[in-house]
Image (cartoon, rainbow, N blue to C red):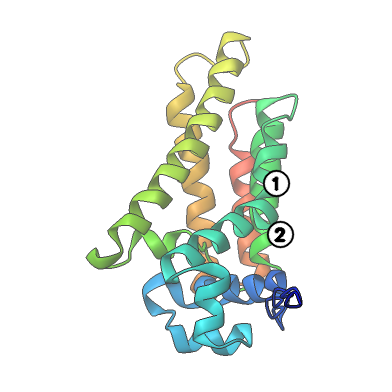
Amino acid sequence: MNAPATIPAKGRPREFDTDVALAAALRVFWKHGYDGASMADLTEAMGITKPSLYAAFGNKEALFNKALDLYEREKLAYMTSALSAPTLRGVAERLLTGALALQTNDCDPKGCMAMSAITCGPEAESIRAAVIERRSSSSAALVARFEQAKAEGELPQGIEPMGLARHLLSNIQGMNAQAAAGASAAELKSLVDTALALWPTK
């Protein structure tokens, strides 16, 4: 008599929504920074145990990278659309107003999530390097758009694409820093209005 076929045991399904948990981790990293976000903070906010976190997302570094992917995909989507604006002023306006909307959103922490990794300790050097690489890629795309504007005769004489692109990014970074320090929505909007009033192209 043949032995009955063995039916493979099914793996136990996860008891949490990974998308919801990742969004919670994003807010923790955004609020506390990479170094400041403890595993206890993360598991509490995500509503899961440490073994479940490791099983679903990997270690803290892997979780941060996944959270950063989500941050760029959802929170910084305006940066991609800004590059398709027909004029350089349009690019600047979309970037500045997009950053303003992000920093005046009551649902999210203030400041820039990625900046928390740039200032992290030496034990997280790989995270810092990865964030710098991402920022360099975004900056290069913006400079390329400004170079295009120069080739089309849109930039005034004496203004270089790289310098103007970095000036714009500095305005956005400054806005993020002031938002993190508690600046009001009206104060942040005044920064945008002033930057656009001084913008050298039409």
* Marks 2 and 1 close (CB-CB < 8 Å): yes
Q: Quick one: quadrant of the N terminus?
A: bottom right
Between 156 and 47, the residue placed more toward the observer is 47
**Amino acid type at mark 2:** Ala
Kindly identify the residue that appears in the image at 53 percent across and 23 percent down.
144
Q: Is residue 100 visible?
A: yes
Check disc 2 and report the residue beneath it. Answer: 101
Rendered position, 160 above or below 173: above
Kindly identify the residue that appears in the image at 70 percent across and 46 percent down.
78
Q: What kind of element bears circle 2?
A: helix
Q: Is residue 119 left or right of residue 85?
A: left
Kindly identify the residue that appears in the image at 60 percent across and 34 percent down.
199
Q: Residues within 10 Å of mark 2 (few under 14, many from 20)?
A: some
> Residue 131 bears which disc, if any?
none
- Where residue 58 appears, as percent x and y from the top left, is 48, 68
**Label 2 vs 1, first from the N-terminus:** 1
Q: Residues within 10 Å of mark 1 (few under 14, many from 20)?
A: some
Question: Image quarter for residue 123?
Answer: bottom left
- Where residue 51 appears, as percent x and y from the top left, is 50, 83
Q: Is residue 86 left or right of residue 45?
A: right
> Residue 78 bears which disc, if any?
1
**Amino acid type at mark 1:** Tyr
Between 79 and 40, the residue placed more toward the observer is 40
